[in-house]
Amino acid sequence: MTAGEDRASRTEDTRRRTEDGRQRNVEGAFPSSVRRCRSSGFLPLWAGLMILGLAVVVVVLLGLLGISILERRWETQRPPVVVRPLQQWEPNNAVWGEDYPREYESYLRTRITDTRTKYGGSYPRDYLDIDPQEVILFAGYGFSKDYLQARGHYFAVQDVTKTARLIRPFNAATCWTCKSTDVPRLMDQMGVKEFYAANFHDLTKEVTHPIGCQDCHDPQTLKLRITRPALQEAFVAMGRNINEATHQEMRSLVCAQCHVEYYFRTDAKAGLKNYLVFPWAKGTALEEILAYYDALEYSDYVHAISGTPIVKMQHPDYELYLTGIHSYRNVSCADCHMPYRTEGGVKYTDHHVQSPLLNIANSCAVCHRWGEDEIRTRVEGIQTKVETARLAAEEALVRAHFDLAATLQAGASAQDLTEARRLVRRGQIRWDFIASNNGMGFHSPQESMRLLGEAANLAQQARVEAARLLAKRGITDPPKYPDISTRQKASEVAQAFVAGQGTKLLP
């Protein structure tokens, strides 16, 4: 063997020993049973059992998933119409609830009267106790006697019959319009004009069911519908067709049947008495509503202190909402106050109508991806600013009413006060447009601040005009304003003016 062949032979032996060593190291890392299985081509027993167990778990999980899917599909197969036919004007919410228990059970939660937010909730309270200045602002009108926070829809009939603002015999059954599911039936039986013209207390035995299903839903198809003619007539007056509204728009319009500004029109020539009208013929903005009332020379009452003809705003929630960001983004009233809920495979609307702050997870957090505390803090911060502006406007208006009364005591004529009264009228309707709204301005914060700022400015202009009239009569000291720090004191002052024996204001 040559030297070269010997070196090649030794190199090959070294390579084989190295390869054998690696193989022994690999096999040494496994139990002998595995080495035997590897050599025989079978898996060990424990590995087979593990695979079998995993397969069983997977099969069980897939079975449960399949059952869950089938259950959800079954739950979602709700009938397109009610199971049992309903009468055209069925007023009893419990009857509707037999086929729609989830909606009915959530509606029944409007009986809760202890919910509370910083500026709202369903707990009973009288605004006049909280804010005595409003006693003065409504002097000579029913709202200076009683201004109760409305409870949930469940109590609508009870609350309207107990208010001190309706004195027997009250000749306007119109006040029933937004309180009961019995109203559409009575309108159908009596006629709309005849219903409005009836005596309120004569219908107490006929009107027993509170706000509910029939007010907003067709009994045959469950589709949203408008049951109150005033809203339909308001759309006609604006040149619009309410029947062209989308489903999303309807989720606000069914609320707009009641949560709006309105007045009672009486016209003997037209055969109308206390006919319900929404003042939207010129538009829904505050300036357009005021222009409508001014053209009619309409007022709800003459202020007992200043003699100013005043229009009392009701609760123009819908009109203010139209100027806000949520309306601009096509977010409906129901999206926030009646959000969707899910139970299993069923998605339904929560009929517990309440403040979104009491249900932030389902109402606000669907769009606003912040924590609940942050959302609540943000909302309350906006509301607090609106309240501050509202109170400032109130104070200016109250002083304006007293300033005008002082000029009368100084001998000024009604003609002398024409401009000052016009300014007060314009200022108070702006303040009331926001103050009478639910939500402390949150439906449209920027519009709320604009109108409250204008209200304060107009009130101050009226005060300047009154000061000028007093100065012409040699009076340069400010009037002596009475103490109205409590409801009782404010009521005594207001009643004295109503009786024609107003507090002496001149220094």
Image: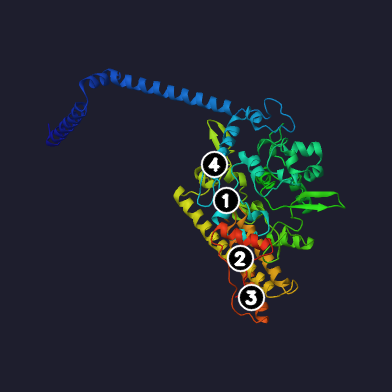
The residue indicated by pointer 4 is 113
The amino acid beneath tag 4 is Thr
Residue type of the residue flagged with mark 3: Val
Q: What residue type is labelled 2?
A: Val
Measured in 3D between alpha carbons, the distance from the residue under mark 2 to the one under mark 4, in whole angstroms, is 32 Å
Position in image of residue 370 (x %, y %):
46, 49
Tell me if residue 56 comes above or below residue 298 in the rendering: above
Residue situated in front as seen by the camera: 412 or 309:
412
Label 3: which secondary element: helix
Is residue 502 visible to us here?
yes
Quadrant of the image occupied by residue 313? bottom right
Tell me, for residue 471, which label it has, or none: none
The residue carrying mark 1 is 126
Classed neighbour count for the residue bearing mark 2: other residues with Cα under 10 Å, few (<14), some (14–19), many (≥20) = many
In which quadrant of the rendered view does residue 363 lie? top right
Out of 354 and 132, give the one closest to the viewer.
Answer: 132
Q: What element carries label 1?
A: loop
The first of marks 2 and 4 along the sequence is 4
Q: Is mark 2 on a helix, strand or loop?
A: helix
- Which element carries disc 4, helix, strand or loop? loop
Q: Mark 2 points at which residue?
A: 398
Give the x, y percent position of residue 218.
71, 35
What is the crowding at mark 3: few (fewer than 14 residues within 10 Å), some, or many (at least 20)? Answer: some
Tell me the quarter of the image containing the N terminus. Answer: top left
Separation of residues labelled 4 and 1 (CA atoms): 14 Å
Q: Do the residues labelled 2 and 3 touch (CB within 8 Å)?
A: no
> In the rendered view of the protein, which quadrant contains the C terminus?
bottom right
Amino acid, disc 1: Asp
State whether residue 364 appears in this view: no
Q: N-terminal of the two: label 4 or label 1?
A: 4
Mark number for residue 464? 3
**Which comes before the other along the chain, label 3 or label 1?**
1
